[in-house]
């Protein structure tokens, strides 16, 4: 015994202290693990994280005004937008120089488009003046104030100058304010008039419909998950195929199938007419409205609700229920007080998953939703691909992303992202 | 729980059977929309509903005309080939990078494991429209927008979370002493990987690959933004068809896609069972 007791540190075979040797081995292990992860991490950063970050940056980016009208922005520095006077001659002279330079390389339309989002009508003032100003001598043909106003009386509108002044910074929260139906007036943030509010309605509609879809998934998914968890393994596996087949079937196949079934001349209406519930002359309108989106998306997201519920219910011991009943509980009490609380984690996991997926849906609402059943995603797609108001699209996207990431964070706390099961 | 006990009261019997009926209806809701398009795709008319001939099971009412149309129409054919060119490449990229990273992630001491995992899973969480818009801007800036490579990279990024999730799940049951034993007998890390670890985790890798494949094969939002006419895939063509003028050829395409998904589902189920069996055998 006394032979093995040593003074000083324990040494490894090669004579280095064991502690240091272990630390070195551990460090090597960490580096090796990171080396294996590094290629993928780099790949995801370049192909995914950077693009998303780049888009989010567009929601606050406002460099265009300073780039195209640098002298005007400088000259406007000393002008007081709260007053009732138009800017002085120096500002107009600066604008003439900027506008001529911009019109020569045809970028005045871009700044016109940018400012038009905030104050409709500005675009035409810029475009019309830009066309004429190319022939001016902007050095010594003043006074420019009178000449510009003569060219287009839009320049005499003080609101136009207030807009330029408000949106002359490099960054703006204007897009975000637009996305929540507000605007940056000369006196600060104000709410848009009732008739111009569309985005809040859209956001609320997206949330409301996602909630309805989530609740219908819970209602339809719970009995099925219960049945699957309580049947013998063989028959449960057979029935599981009926849940997994929709899960594996192409999203477009399922959407087109609903599009065909729900038509007024489609199979569902035919059957209803044949049974006699509905008259042939007033067939139900099941598609191109909210109902169509809700039916199709409930069908599409139902497997995502059933699978997590099933995996939680599988772990609930049936003996608890029997114990509750033998202690005198009625069937309902035994279910509600004993079984249901244990199945809540499954409901939670499934609900968050369904809600996250529903909020960001694009394809199905676009195809079966008509105009009443579209989601915020459809609006983002419209701004990115059709209207060209990228900043607003990005701001709406950022809001959607924050909602989704918050829910994802809750999901991670509740279930753990490592525990996601596929199939 | 599964069978009705002999002492059940009438009330319990009624509830038992009505519960089964409710579940049956929900299963019907799940499966019917997929099944119903199969007979409809053999419709001899250009209708989207059952014709009287079809209901009488008259052979006159059925035909392969929509399938013929699919195989002879240029735009459908080129979109099918585009899909078949893009999906396997995207799968290859995601499986290669994804498997390596999953092995790295399942090592016992990985710094910032949670953060890394969150980043790698993010393509699955971020709404597709946001990913698509971001990729559209960024890829146009670096000249990848509208190219084959751009679409492959975008789809590979979307498939990676599935590979990571399935492969890490398989690695949880992997017996680490096997690699140590191999190293002990003189195998270098590369040999150990290909001869010992790979065969054992192969089921997980393949099912991850199938997930990645179906993700790319089924994807439409990102390809709409990142791709150009030259990369028009099958889902893209279907999306246009559904949006503008819906032609019954879509039913034939949908039926073929359902057949593909049945095959994929069968393969994944088989692999899952095999992997569970393998795991059951290895000492843990």
Image (cartoon, rainbow, N blue to C red):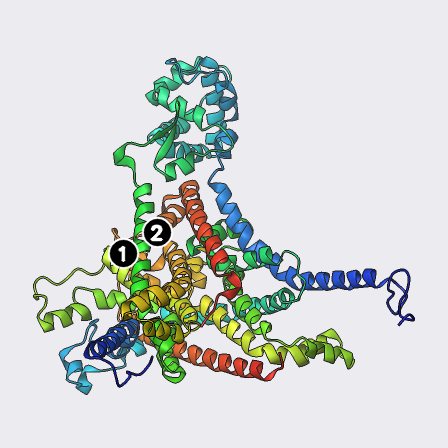
In the rendered structure, the residue with mark 1 lies on which chain? A
Q: Position of residue A68 (x, y in %)?
A: 50, 30
| Whether label 1 touches label 2, CB < 8 Å | yes
Q: Position of residue A287 (x, y in %)?
A: 22, 60
Q: Nearer the viewer, residue A102 or B202?
A: B202
In the rendered structure, the residue with mark 2 lies on which chain? A
Q: Answer with left or right where residue A283 lies relative to residue A414.
A: left
| Residue B218 marker | none
Lower position in the chain sequence, tag 1 or tag 2: 1
Q: Is residue B171 above or below residue A78?
A: below
Q: Nearer the viewer, residue B210 or A213?
A: A213
What whole-number distance in Å separates the C-alpha atoms at marks 1 and 2? 10 Å
Regarding residue B214, the answer to whether it shows in the image is: yes
Q: Quadrant of residue B104?
A: bottom right
Q: Quadrant of the N terminus of chain B?
A: bottom left
Residue at image location 38% in from the left, 45% down from the top: A383
Of all residues, the one furthest to the front in this rendering is A327
Regarding residue B146, the answer to whether it shows in the image is: no
Q: Is residue B54 above or below residue B143?
A: below
Residue at image mark 1:
A369
Q: Position of residue A60 (x, y in %)?
A: 48, 38
SS category of the residue bearing label 1? loop
Residue at image mark 2:
A378
Q: Position of residue B249 (x, y in %)?
A: 29, 72
Residue at image location 46% in from the left, 72% down from the top: B84
């Amino acid at each position: 015994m006394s032979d093995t007791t040593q003074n000083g540190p324990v040494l490894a075979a090669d004579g280095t202290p064991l502690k240091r040797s272990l630390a070195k081995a551990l460090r090597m292990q960490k580096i090796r693990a990171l080396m294996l992860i590094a290629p993928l991490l780099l790949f995801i950063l370049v192909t995914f994280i950077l693009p998303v970050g780049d888009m989010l940056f567009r929601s606050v980016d406002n460099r265009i005004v300073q780039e195209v009208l640098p002298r005007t922005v400088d000259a406007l520095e000393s002008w007081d937008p709260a007053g009732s006077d138009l800017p002085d001659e120096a500002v107009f002279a600066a604008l003439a120089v900027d506008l001529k330079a911009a019109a020569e390389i045809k970028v005045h339309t871009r700044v016109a488009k940018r400012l038009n989002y905030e104050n409709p009508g500005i675009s035409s003032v810029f475009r019309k003046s830009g066309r004429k100003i190319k022939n001016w001598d902007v050095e010594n043909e003043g006074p420019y104030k009178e000449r510009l106003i003569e060219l287009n009386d839009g320049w005499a509108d003080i609101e136009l100058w207030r807009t330029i002044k408000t949106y002359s910074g490099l960054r703006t929260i204007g897009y975000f304010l637009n996305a929540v139906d507000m605007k940056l007036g000369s006196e600060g943030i104000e709410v848009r008039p009732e008739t111009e509010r569309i985005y809040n309605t859209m956001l609320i509609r997206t949330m409301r419909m996602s909630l309805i879809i989530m609740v219908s998934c819970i209602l339809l998914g719970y009995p099925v998950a219960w049945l699957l968890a309580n049947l013998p393994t063989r028959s449960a596996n057979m029935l599981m195929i009926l849940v997994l087949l929709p899960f594996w079937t192409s999203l477009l196949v399922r959407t087109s199938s609903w599009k065909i079934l729900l038509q007024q001349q489609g199979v569902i209406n035919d059957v209803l007419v044949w049974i006699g519930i509905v008259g042939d002359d007033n067939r139900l309108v099941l598609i191109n409205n909210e109902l169509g989106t809700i039916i199709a998306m409930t069908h599409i997201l139902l497997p995502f609700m059933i699978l997590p519920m099933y995996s939680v219910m599988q772990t609930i011991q049936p003996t608890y229920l029997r114990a509750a009943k033998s202690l005198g509980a009625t069937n309902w009490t035994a279910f509600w007080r004993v079984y249901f609380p244990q199945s809540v984690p499954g409901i939670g996991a499934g609900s968050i998953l369904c809600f996250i997926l529903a909020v960001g849906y694009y394809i199905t609402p676009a195809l079966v939703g008509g105009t009443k059943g579209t989601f915020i995603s459809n609006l983002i797609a419209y701004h990115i691909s059709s209207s060209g108001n990228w900043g607003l699209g990005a701001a709406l996207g950022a809001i959607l992303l924050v909602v989704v990431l918050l829910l994802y964070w809750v999901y991670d706390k509740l279930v753990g992202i490592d525990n996601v099961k596929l199939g | 729980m599964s069978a009705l006990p002999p002492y059940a009261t009438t009330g319990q019997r009624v509830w038992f059977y009505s519960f089964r009926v409710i579940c049956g209806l929900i299963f019907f809701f799940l499966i019917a929309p997929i099944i119903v398009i199969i007979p409809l795709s053999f419709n001899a008319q250009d209708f989207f509903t059952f014709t009287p001939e079809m209901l009488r099971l008259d052979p006159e009412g059925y035909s392969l005309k929509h399938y013929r149309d699919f195989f002879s129409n240029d735009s459908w054919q080129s979109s099918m080939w585009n899909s078949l060119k893009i999906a396997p490449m995207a799968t290859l990229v995601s499986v290669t990078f994804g498997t390596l990273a999953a092995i790295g992630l399942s090592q016992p001491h990985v710094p910032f494991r949670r953060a890394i995992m969150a980043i790698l899973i993010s393509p699955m969480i971020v709404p597709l429209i946001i990913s698509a818009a971001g990729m559209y801007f960024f890829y146009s800036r670096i000249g990848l927008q509208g190219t084959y490579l751009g679409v492959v990279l975008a789809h590979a990024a979307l498939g990676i979370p599935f590979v990571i999730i399935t492969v890490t799940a398989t690695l949880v049951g992997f017996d680490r002493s096997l690699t140590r034993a191999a190293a002990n007998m003189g195998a270098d890390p590369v040999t150990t990987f290909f001869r010992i670890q790979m065969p054992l985790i192969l089921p997980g890798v393949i099912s991850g690959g199938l997930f990645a494949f179906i993700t790319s094969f089924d994807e439409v939002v990102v390809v709409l933004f990142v791709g150009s006419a030259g990369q028009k895939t099958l889902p893209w063509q279907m999306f246009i068809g559904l949006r503008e003028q819906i032609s019954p050829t879509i039913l034939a395409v949908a039926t073929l896609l359902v057949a593909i998904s049945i095959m994929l589902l069968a393969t994944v189920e088989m692999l899952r069972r095999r992997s569970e069996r393998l795991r059951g055998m290895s000492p843990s």
